[in-house]
Image (spheres, rainbow, N blue to C red):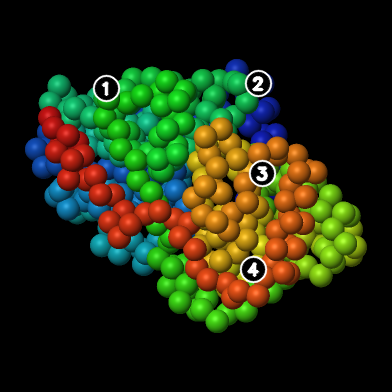
Amino acid sequence: MSIKEFIKARVKSQLAARNNYKVTGIPPMTVVAGASNTVPRLNLVVMGIRKGALFGGADTAIRLFDAVSPHFQRHRLIVQSEAEDSFDTEKWAGWDLDSKPHAGSKTIAFQKQPNFVPQIDESDHFIATNWMSAMFVRSARRVQSVRRPSRFIYMIQDYEPGFYPWSGRHLLARATYVPKDDAIAVFNTQLLHDYFVKNDIVYPMSYAFEPRLSPSLAKHLGKLAGHKKRKLMLVYGRPGTGRNAFDMVVEALENWSRTDPNAGEWELVSLGEKHRDIKLAKGLVLRSRGKVPLDQYASYLLDAAVGFSLMASPHPSYPPLEMAEFGALVVTNTFDNKDLSQRVGNIRSVVETTPVALAAALQATCEEFSRTTVPASAARAFLGGEVEFPFLPDLVPKFLEG
């Protein structure tokens, strides 16, 4: 989404809220009870599956779904924010539209499809992937018969109330963490799990996993040996996502470009979300490339000597880990119990998250690269092992309980 599109959507949302006095932006929650069916079905509830939507946490959720799928005879994706025109028959070969009669055992239900409401039966098991999908799952479970499964899986990939100011949406997101006995919490990283426990959000049944580097990127790691890094600073730039603190990123770069006498030697590229190019001191320009294909992203990761990525939340976020895994020296921030510098040596975590302190860290990091004579090598930033969800043998029987 461009900045212009983001602002337009935000203004539209604010006007709707002002005129209707309703919490806006919540996808449809309507479901109906279907015919009785005793064949277990696994449902993954996601926001979108269109091209470009399945990355980061969404891609991880698909992998969890795939890992649990062998225990079920029927499978369904429930897509909350898209209609059937998002259905890519090539990518989802072998899957039918849930709205069609006589659909097979693998279907995709698009909730924004006109005149269509997903049918729920007593054998439906659910994986929620964010707070809105958790709201949907609880709505769906209310229409199931008394023979419904005991629990659903709540995949928690960040502290999502923090995505919003204190507001109705903030309260709704927090509310999904309140009933705990009906959910099996699966946390994306032990760090995030520990943050929840620290804030007295404790689930009777919970697991944590460490994500792996995306296979689409990992296949390029072998090229790093002998590859010469250059004075390229890779910046994670997402102006439309507040938790990535793009305003702080820009102010820090402005400070760094003025105070570092050697700043002019560096090339700056922003990836993540398209924005206007930003002029800095010494003729430097932060050039935006937006969201690029993974192979092109891997090329940037191979070349970049320095990475700069902020995240105002307890989740580590993938970009600084990806940059570090490819041998870049990375500047990021601490947050509560999160300090990625304790995980891997080529990450510098800044405690005092101000433009001046971040600029000083960038200068020190650039100077460190200029001094080093050691070729770049891959670092172990992602902690996930060969088996990404090793707890499944313990989780699945609890999930299957009636």
Q: Earlier in the sequence, mark 2 or mark 1?
A: 2
- According to the picture, the residue beneath numbered tag 4 turns out to be 304
Q: CA distance from mark 1 to mark 3?
A: 38 Å
C-beta proximity under 8 Å, tags 4 and 3: no
Q: Earlier in the sequence, mark 3 or mark 2?
A: 2
| Element assignment for label 1 | loop
Is 346 placed above or below 29 here? Answer: below
Sort mark 4 into few (<14), some (14-19) or many (20+) by Cα contacts within 10 Å: many
Depth check: 122 or 267 in front? 267
Q: Residue at x 56, y 49 (%)?
A: 341
Q: Residue at x 15, y 22 (%)?
A: 146
The C terminus - image quarter: top left
Q: Earlier in the sequence, mark 4 or mark 2?
A: 2
- Image x and y of residue 215, in percent: 40, 65
**Relative horizontal placement of residue 315, taking residue 181 as reference (left or right):** right
Q: Earlier in the sequence, mark 1 or mark 4?
A: 1
Q: Nearer the viewer, mark 4 or mark 3?
A: 3
| Element assignment for label 2 | helix
Q: Nearer the viewer, mark 1 or mark 4?
A: 4
- According to the picture, the residue beneath numbered tag 3 turns out to be 350
The residue at the far top in this view is: 21
Sort mark 2 into few (<14), some (14-19) or many (20+) by Cα contacts within 10 Å: few
Is 10 placed above or below 86 here? Answer: above
C-beta proximity under 8 Å, tags 4 and 2: no
Q: Residue at x 45, y 25 (%)?
A: 198
